[in-house]
Image (tube, grey):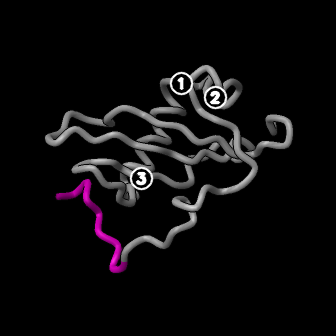
């Protein structure tokens, strides 16, 4: 289901797990695919690429706990967008570091 002409939604999510420092996340979700396709984490006043494991974990959260998310992402404060935001199209740092494993 496409929300009007808006295939994607972007929104913020509070920390996926307890952490020090506190981390806030932003995610890009493809509503048609029902998939989390990009993300960034904010800590120490800067945004960095979300780890692959955290993208998978956010997908699991939506699939298992918030099944209604894909039908009504507005209810979760996500904004509808027509295209990828510039931050979501940025290349990941290479070599890809899995920060969740640290």
Q: Residue 33: give x, y in percent of width and height.
A: 70, 47
> Taking 17 as reference, is 8 left or right?
right
Residue sitting at the far bottom: 95
Q: What element carries label 2?
A: helix
Whole-number angstrom distance, CA of label 3 to CA of label 1:
20 Å
Q: Please, is residue 18 above or below residue 76 in the view?
A: below
Q: Residue 65: give x, y in percent of width and height.
A: 48, 24
Residue under the image location 51 percent in, 45 percent down: 27
Q: Please, is residue 59 above or below residue 77 in the view?
A: below
| Residue bearing the label numbered 2 | 73
| Residue bearing the label numbered 1 | 66
Q: Residue 16: give x, y in percent of width and height.
A: 33, 36
Q: Earlier in the sequence, mark 3 or mark 1?
A: 3
| Residue bearing the label numbered 3 | 40
- Quadrant where the C terminus sits is bottom left
Tags 2 and 1 touching, CB below 8 Å: no
Tags 2 and 3 touching, CB below 8 Å: no
Residue under the image location 18 percent in, 39 percent down: 19
> Taking 82 as reference, is 102 left or right?
left
Q: Residues within 10 Å of mark 3 (few under 14, many from 20)?
A: many
> Taking 9 as reference, is 99 left or right?
left
What is the span of residues highlighted in magenta in the rendered image?
Answer: 94-102
Q: Quadrant of residue 22?
A: top left
| 98 part of magenta stretch | yes
């Amino acid at each position: 289901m496409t929300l009007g002409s808006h295939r994607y939604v972007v929104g913020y999510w509070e920390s996926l797990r307890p952490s020090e420092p506190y981390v806030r996340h932003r995610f890009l979700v493809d509503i048609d695919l029902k998939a989390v396709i990009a993300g960034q984490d904010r800590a120490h006043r800067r945004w960095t690429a979300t780890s692959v494991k955290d993208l998978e974990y956010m997908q699991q959260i939506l699939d298992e706990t918030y099944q209604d998310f894909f039908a009504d992402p507005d209810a979760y404060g996500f904004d509808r967008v027509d295209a990828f935001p510039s931050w979501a199209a940025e290349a990941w740092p290479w070599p890809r570091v899995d920060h969740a494993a640290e």
